[in-house]
């Protein structure tokens, strides 16, 4: 992650505004090369439910105000999280918000969705828009490596051995109580993702990047995301232990050698701890953050969404909207499609009877007859979904 941040800052810091200008310069020509997106069925048929208000997602409320807002999109694998997140980011940018779309899913698909190479763990301008939209695919594994390296340096292993060899066995024994070895070698699942996010937060706070007013997160599938949300407390505790160790060591070093052992790792961990705490607060602040659940109209996917909402509620994460993606058109000559549509409608009906989901604002996106890839396709999706 250090490498990632270093790279981002090195390559983007000074040329950021220049890049925006450049990307704006190239827009007209790059737009010309985008494949036109013209799904055949949906422009003609009514695909939404019978009520005219169904599918209105409250985009006006989402787009209003210049204050920075974070949107996290999550749900079961393959339901269309990336497509929905990318289309939201495009729509925000089109409405004048300098926007960043971040993928924290270890199996990134932003590049596929935008049909542009956004890989490399650095901020990349998305082409084909009239306003600044940047994408970042962060590599959670690298973030975890950085955390492990920093904690291992301070952890019980090396330091404890060193202390024992110096005849400081008693202090070393006390360190054993902290169970640092165990803690550092078995990080909980999802730790990588939260650390990656915390690094993005650190970097978003820098002056160069405070112009971004909308940040859209494309998260990993449900289970991973849930573990992620409960992690800040865990990490807060574990980083706290490391800091405690550092304090103990510092005072021993001082009494022995008259000066504390200089280590930058501790201040790195301090920063990490502060940003993990910040993320926890951010996840719970309805004024700045919203988690949007994405699902498809099947009983299984809707049941999972219901469980997801229940867990998010328990965690105190603000959720207002539920996207039902891939809804079939209302009229069709295809018998299979009509049967499938009836099945979908029954599944959607079950949302209204689900105590967890009934209170959420229901947004619908049609199943289109072309893969959603590239800015024109994402604009199309955004115009039907984010209304
Ligand atoms: N409404 C839609 N109509 C047609 N195709 C769609 C629609 N939504 C998504 N797709 C297609 O479905 C596939 C999966 O979509 P996407 O990558 O957005 O899902 P995901 O939930 O992010 O997947 P994963 O869990 O694997 O990250 C892609 O090929 C995308 O183009």
Image (cartoon, rainbow, N blue to C red):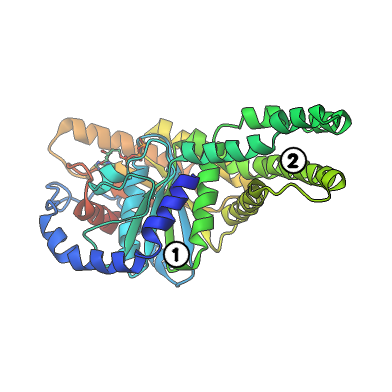
Using residue 23 as the reference point, say whether residue 85 is left or right of it: right
From the viewer's side, name the closer residue of 1 and 57: 1
Q: Is residue 110 visible?
A: yes
Q: Which residue is mark 2?
A: 241
- Characterize the local packing of mark 1: few (<14), some (14-19) or many (20 or more) Cα atoms within 10 angstroms: some
- Secondary structure beneath dot 2 equals helix
Q: Position of residue 199 (x, y in %)?
A: 52, 50
From the top left corner, tell me how far across and down residue 270 is, in percent.
67, 51
What is the distance, in whole Å, between disc 1 and disc 2 at their CAs?
A: 32 Å
- Vertical side of 120 occupied by 182: above or below: above
Residue 158 horizontal side relative to residue 101, left or right = right
| Residue 209 image label | 1
- Residue at 59% across / 59% down in the picture? 285
Q: Residues within 10 Å of mark 2 (few under 14, many from 20)?
A: some
Picture quarter with the C terminus: bottom left
Residue at (78% x, 33% y) in the render:
178
Q: Could you say which is closer to the camera, residue 212 or residue 311?
A: 212
Residue shown at 38%/54% (left/top)? 101
Hey, which quadrant is residue 130 in on the image? bottom left
First in sequence: mark 1 or mark 2? 1
**Depicted 316 relative to depicted 300: above or below:** below
- Considering depth in this image, is 109 or 283 the residue closer to the camera? 109
Q: Position of residue 341 (x, y in %)?
A: 26, 37
The quarter of the image that holds ligand 1 is: top left
Single out the residue that lies furthest toward the bottom.
65
């Amino acid at each position: 992650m250090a490498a990632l941040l270093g790279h981002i800052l090195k390559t983007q810091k000074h040329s950021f505004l220049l890049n925006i200008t450049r990307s704006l310069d190239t827009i007209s020509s790059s737009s010309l090369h985008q494949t036109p997106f013209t799904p055949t069925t949906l422009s003609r048929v009514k695909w939404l439910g019978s009520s005219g208000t169904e599918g209105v997602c409250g985009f006006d409320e989402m787009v209003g105000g210049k204050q920075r807002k974070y949107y996290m999109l999550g749900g079961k694998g393959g339901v269309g999280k990336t497509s929905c997140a990318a289309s939201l980011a495009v729509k925000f940018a089109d409405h004048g918000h300098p926007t960043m779309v971040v993928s924290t899913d270890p199996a990134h698909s932003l590049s596929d969705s935008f049909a542009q190479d956004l890989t490399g763990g650095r901020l990349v301008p998305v082409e084909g828009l009239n306003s600044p939209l940047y994408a970042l695919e962060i590599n959670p594994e690298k973030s975890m490596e950085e955390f492990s390296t920093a904690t291992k340096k301070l952890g019980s292993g090396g330091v404890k051995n060193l202390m024992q060899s110096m005849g400081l066995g008693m202090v070393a024994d006390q360190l054993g109580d902290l169970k640092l070895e165990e803690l550092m070698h078995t990080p909980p699942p999802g730790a990588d993702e939260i650390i990656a996010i915390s690094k993005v937060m650190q970097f978003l706070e820098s002056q160069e990047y405070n112009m971004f007013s909308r940040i859209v997160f494309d998260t990993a599938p449900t289970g991973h995301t849930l573990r992620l949300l409960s992690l800040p407390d865990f990490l807060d505790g574990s980083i706290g232990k490391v800091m405690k160790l550092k304090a103990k060591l510092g005072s021993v070093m001082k009494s022995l050698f008259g000066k504390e052992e200089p280590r930058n790792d501790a201040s790195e961990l301090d920063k990490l701890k502060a940003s993990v705490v910040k993320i926890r607060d951010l996840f719970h602040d309805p004024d700045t953050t919203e988690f949007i659940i994405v699902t498809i109209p099947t009983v299984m996917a809707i049941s999972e969404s219901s469980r997801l909402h229940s867990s998010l509620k328990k965690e105190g994460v603000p959720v207002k909207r539920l996207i039902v993606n891939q809804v079939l058109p209302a009229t069709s000559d295809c018998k299979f499609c009509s049967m499938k549509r009836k099945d979908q409608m029954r599944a959607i009906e079950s949302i209204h009877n689900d105590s967890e989901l009934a209170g959420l604002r229901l947004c619908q996106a049609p199943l289109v007859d072309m893969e959603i890839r590239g800015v024109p396709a994402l604009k199309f999706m955004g115009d039907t979904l984010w209304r």
